[in-house]
Image (cartoon, helix red, strand yellow):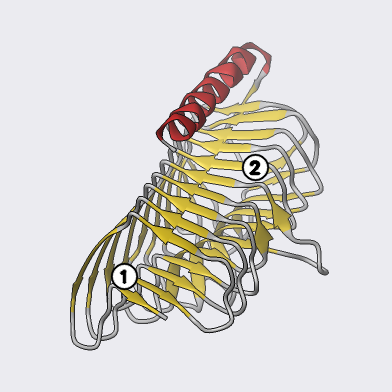
């Protein structure tokens, strides 16, 4: 497992380094709009309403250059449908309904960004949403949600029965500061790797990692999860063949279990996790 984790870590770092040579191909931009070629932000932006960037081409690199994009509690920071091989790197963004909203987006990289969501998130969506999207990496980001809305910070889901597959969520700092907001939700996704993230949630019904809807063949390893009021990892609704290994879980609150799994789940490997609980009716592992 250690060799595998180290391989993933080196692979992600090399992948980030490989995109930087594309800098000489990018155009400088100073405003929101449709993106059809690689761009680099040259100043901070404030948008009064709606979505900032809509990506409508493939094989693009979007470099934030460390500048900040501020919304007005609506729309998406970046909206993408039916694209592949997109890199979004080094942005600061805040105050949008959704930061990264992907539908049928494949083989893309989202890394080195700092996102804070203060706007309203629609029910059953995420600050970062991957819907029916495959082979993407969300890595080395800082992502924080300050809102309540039956949502999640990172959401892996589907559109019209096409599941999300083979995505990696690794080395992020994820924080949810209100009720009804999970850190990471696998609603309908398979072969997801959730590796070495630091996850913190504060509020009822705000699990650190929440596996729903029968998501099979997912691996959750080497994460540090600190929870107040909910479970560290919740595996629900007939999930199959999930691995939960080498995680550190700390929970505070009544019925705030370290790991909870409802009946009907099959072939779950739960091993070598460090679990500390503080609360009435709370168990380290609850079946």
Q: Quadrant of the N terminus?
A: top left
Q: Quadrant of the C terminus?
A: bottom left
Residue, x 37% and y 47% (percent of image)? 222
Residue, x 35% and y 68% (percent of image)? 232
Front: mark 1 or 2: 1
In the image: residue 137, left or right of residue 79: left
Residue, x 35% and y 50% (percent of image)? 246
Task: Report x, y in % for residue 205.
Answer: 40, 80
Task: Report x, y in % for residue 102.
Answer: 68, 53
Say if 223 sits above or below 151 in the image: above
Say whether residue 73 is visible.
no
Q: How many marks?
A: 2
Q: Residues within 10 Å of mark 1 (few under 14, many from 20)?
A: many
Closer to the camera in the image, 10 or 158 = 10
Task: Report x, y in % for residue 165.
Answer: 70, 52
- Secondary structure of the residue carrying numbered label 2: loop
In the image: residue 186, left or right of residue 106: left
Closer to the camera in the image, 233 or 184 = 233
Task: Say which quarter of the image contains residue 172.
Answer: top left
Q: Residue at label 2?
A: 136
Task: Estimate the spatial distance between the alpha carbons at disc 1 and disc 2, rounded to whole Å.
Answer: 28 Å
Q: Are marks 1 and 2 in contact (CB under 8 Å)?
A: no
Task: Say which quarter of the image contains residue 188.
Answer: bottom right
Task: Report x, y in % for residue 134.
Answer: 72, 47
Say whether residue 139 is visible.
yes
Residue, x 35% and y 74% (percent of image)? 231
Please report whichever mark, 1 or 2, sits nearer to the chain's N-terminal start: 2
Q: Which mark is residue 258?
A: 1
- Secondary structure of the residue carrying numbered label 1: loop
């Amino acid at each position: 497992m250690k060799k595998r984790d180290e391989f993933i870590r080196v692979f992600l770092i090399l992948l980030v380094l490989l995109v930087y040579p594309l800098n000489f191909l990018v155009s400088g931009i100073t405003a929101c709009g449709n993106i059809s070629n690689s761009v680099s932000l040259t100043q901070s932006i404030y948008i009064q309403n709606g979505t900032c960037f809509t990506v409508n081409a493939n094989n693009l690199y979007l470099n934030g250059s460390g500048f900040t994009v501020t919304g007005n509690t609506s729309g998406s920071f970046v909206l993408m449908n039916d694209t592949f091989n997109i890199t979004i790197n080094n942005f600061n963004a805040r105050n949008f309904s959704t930061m990264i909203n992907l539908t049928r987006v494949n083989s893309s990289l989202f890394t080195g960004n700092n996102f804070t969501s203060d706007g309203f998130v629609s029910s059953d969506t995420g600050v970062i949403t991957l819907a029916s999207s495959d082979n993407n990496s969300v890595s080395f980001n800082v992502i924080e949600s300050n809102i309540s809305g039956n949502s999640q910070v990172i959401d892996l889901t589907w559109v019209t029965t096409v599941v999300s597959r083979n995505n990696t969520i690794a080395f992020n700092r994820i924080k949810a500061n209100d009720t009804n907001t999970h850190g990471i939700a696998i609603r309908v996704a398979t072969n997801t790797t959730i590796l070495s993230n630091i996850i913190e949630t504060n509020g009822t019904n705000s699990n650190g990692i929440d596996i729903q809807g029968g998501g099979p063949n997912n691996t959750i390893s080497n994460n540090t999860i600190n929870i107040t009021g909910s479970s560290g990892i919740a595996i629900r609704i007939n999930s199959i063949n999930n691995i939960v290994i080498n995680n550190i879980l700390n929970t505070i609150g009544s019925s705030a279990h370290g790991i909870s799994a409802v009946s009907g789940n099959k072939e779950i490997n739960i091993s070598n996790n460090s679990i500390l609980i503080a609360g009435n009716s709370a168990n380290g592992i609850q079946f």
